[in-house]
Amino acid sequence: MKRLKGKNIVIGITGGIAAYKSADLTRRLMEAGASVRIVMTHAATGFVTPLTFQALSGQPVAFDNNEADADNGMQHIELARWADAIVVTPASANTIARLAHGRADNLLTALCLASEAVKCFAPAMNRVMWDDLSTQANCRTLTDKHWQQFGPASGLQACGETGEGRMMEVGDIMQALAQCFDSGELQGLNLVVTAGPTYEAIDPVRFIGNRSSGRMGYAIAEAAQHAGASVTLVSGPTHLTAPDGVQLTAVESAEEMRQAVFTQLGDCQIYISTAAVADYRVENIASRKIKKSADKLTLTLVRNDDILSLVAAHPKRPFVVGFAAETENVVDNAREKLLGKKLDMIAANDVSDSAAEHGDGQTIGFNSEYNALHVLSTADGTRVEQQYFAIARKSQLAKQLISLIAAQYKMKNQNEKNTA
Ligand code: PMT
């Protein structure tokens, strides 16, 4: 939790039974070295008293009808400027709707609208309210406006029902909040990240491609750069712009990608293979556009090199992270790729039609803003460890993955030093 030290955090508390959990969050943030200020909506004060939070944070609590007492009635501006992050927890369906629509009709919503800080929200509500299409659309509007969404979790609810809508546990909120700040975890390291599809030419106008948009890889490149790494992004054709500070090498085919990767490998400590690289290419690319003539056309395909396997087999191999796009037996197949290709880590995503849907029909994996990852690693050299990163925006998952990669890379290096 070093990343929270010295940070100014505003906790916005809205009306919900989970409001009491924000007392624990306040205490734990302060223990982590953050300064905390509390803003409560009127509804929140019906669940918990401002005095509790004043005692815990050591600061007066701000709520709707005491703004006039503050300097010039400008408390929302003062807090908006002070905050490094605002975390609305619990975030009720009502407040989420207000925030999504840019309302500024209470101190908390006005403060959020006026602030350039990192903004996060932890939804907490009855499962039916959570499933409601308006709530889902409002959450998406917020995440589109770069709010970080934490949870919700699933389980028994205060109303007696069971389902999705419980507020994320405080420990998980702390972790997610810490990941919103640059970590320096990869300071001084060189990373190569591959992203996007490859195009395998058939003739001058046609190619064999795939549905990769590049979003997952670009998000990883950005998260790695924010964590202090020097990042080279080797990307197949996409519509995305490379993140600031990331060096882009644009390629088209798998063979061009292989060459670009190996040019960078000498000075690379971590290789992350997010690209959807074609397994096959056309044996004889036609030099002219193939004319429509016969009823059937046969193309002979030949195997491409598996770039990931080649990198992992290199005598001076970096820490190697693969991805696996699977439509069935996701974890078992990923484990096979992890061990078969001798990787340090693999992140597997379910790209089948039946893959989990996010909210109102949002799919995961290829060409989506969202994903969910089963991460398997062998970094301690003895056994396969497994974690699941639940459905979230790719930007959020990328931060989680980069944190894990940084930790495992350090652990592997330490183990190698100990056994040398
Ligand atoms: O780009 P998005 O729209 O954001 O979608 C993200 C994604 C679904 C493409 C991404 O999350 C993902 O799963 N990437 C890996 C896709 C893939 O090719 O999976 P695979 O299981 O076929 O390949 C396994 C690994 O081998 C991958 O790391 C791949 O980069 C690598 N590979 C494959 C073939 C090849 N010739 N060379 C390789 O290096």
Image: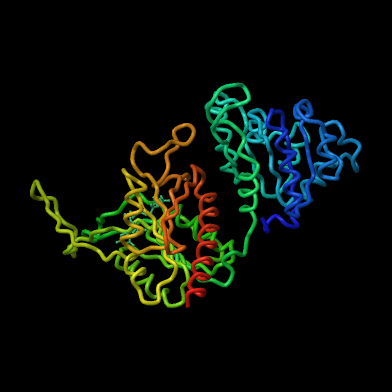
Q: Give the residue displayed 9% in from the left and 50% down from the top.
A: 293
Residue 169 appears in view: yes
Relative to residue 364, is residue 300 depicted above or below? Answer: below
Residue 239 appears in view: no
Tell me: 62 left or right of 411: right
- Image coordinates of residue 28 in percent, x first then y, are 72, 47
Tell me: 303 left or right of 142: left
Tell me: 282 left or right of 384: left
Residue 125 or 52: which is nearer the viewer?
52
- Image coordinates of residue 6 in percent, x first then y, are 75, 57
> Looking at the rendering, which quadrant does residue 228 occupy?
bottom right
Q: Give the residue displayed 61% in from the left and 45% down from the top.
A: 172
> Looking at the rendering, which quadrant does residue 227 occupy?
bottom right
Q: Give the residue displayed 67% in from the left and 57% down from the top.
A: 3
**Which of the image's four quarters has the N terminus?**
bottom right
- Image coordinates of residue 160 in percent, x first then y, are 59, 21
Q: Give the residue displayed 49% in from the left and 67% down from the top.
A: 412
